[in-house]
Image (cartoon, rainbow, N blue to C red):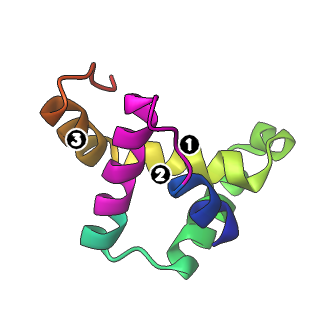
Amino acid sequence: MGAYDGGLGTFSENDPYAEANSRGISSCTQQSKLDSGMLVQLVETNYAQNPDSWALPPSSVLSKGLFAICKTYINNVRRAKGLDLLR
């Protein structure tokens, strides 16, 4: 959970995209009721299905996975702020 906690609440007020991403992921994890076990499973599944990803630290794998899972939530926040959407 440390990687999740460290990355989620850390954004600059001068970076509206980082703030929107953080708020979208926070909303997503709360609405989806994601817990620490699910986040561990997300990372472990990625490593099992993508052997090349072993070169990446778990925090990067987790971030990539959360962006994929939470894309709709992130885009909802971005849309509300008039920012470009994730594709």
Look at the image and say whether residue 14 sits in the magenta stretch.
Answer: yes
Q: Residues within 10 Å of mark 3 (few under 14, many from 20)?
A: many
Residue 63: x, y in percent? 57, 48
Front position among marks 1 and 3: 3
Determine which of the numbered discs, if any, sits on residue 66 in the image: 2
- Decide: is 55 above or below 85: below
Q: Quadrant of the C terminus?
A: top left
Magenta stretch?
Answer: 10-28
Q: Quadrant of residue 71?
A: top left
Q: Position of residue 14 (x, y in %)?
A: 46, 29
Query: The residue tagged with tag 3: helix, strand or loop?
Result: helix
Q: Earlier in the sequence, mark 3 or mark 2?
A: 2
The amino acid type, in three-letter code, at marker 1 is Lys
Badge 1 element: helix
Please report whichever mark, 1 or 3, sits nearer to the chain's N-terminal start.
1
- Mainly helix, strand or loop, the magenta region? helix
- The residue lying at 18 percent from left, 40 percent from top is 76
How many angstroms separate mark 1 from mark 2 (CA)? 6 Å
Tell me where residue 37 sits by quadrant.
bottom right
Q: Label 1 neighbourhood size at 10 Å, few (<14), some (14-19), many (20+)? A: some
Q: Is residue 27 above or below residue 71?
A: below
Residue at position x 64%, y 60% from top?
Answer: 6
User: Which residue sits furthest top?
Assistant: 84
> Which residue is disc 1 drawn over?
64
Q: Residue at x 44, y 37 (%)?
A: 13
Report whether 44 appears left or right of 56.
left
Query: Which residue matches tag 3?
Result: 77
Asked whether the residues under the numbered discs 1 and 2 touch, taking CB atoms below 8 Å apart as contact, a structural biologist would say yes
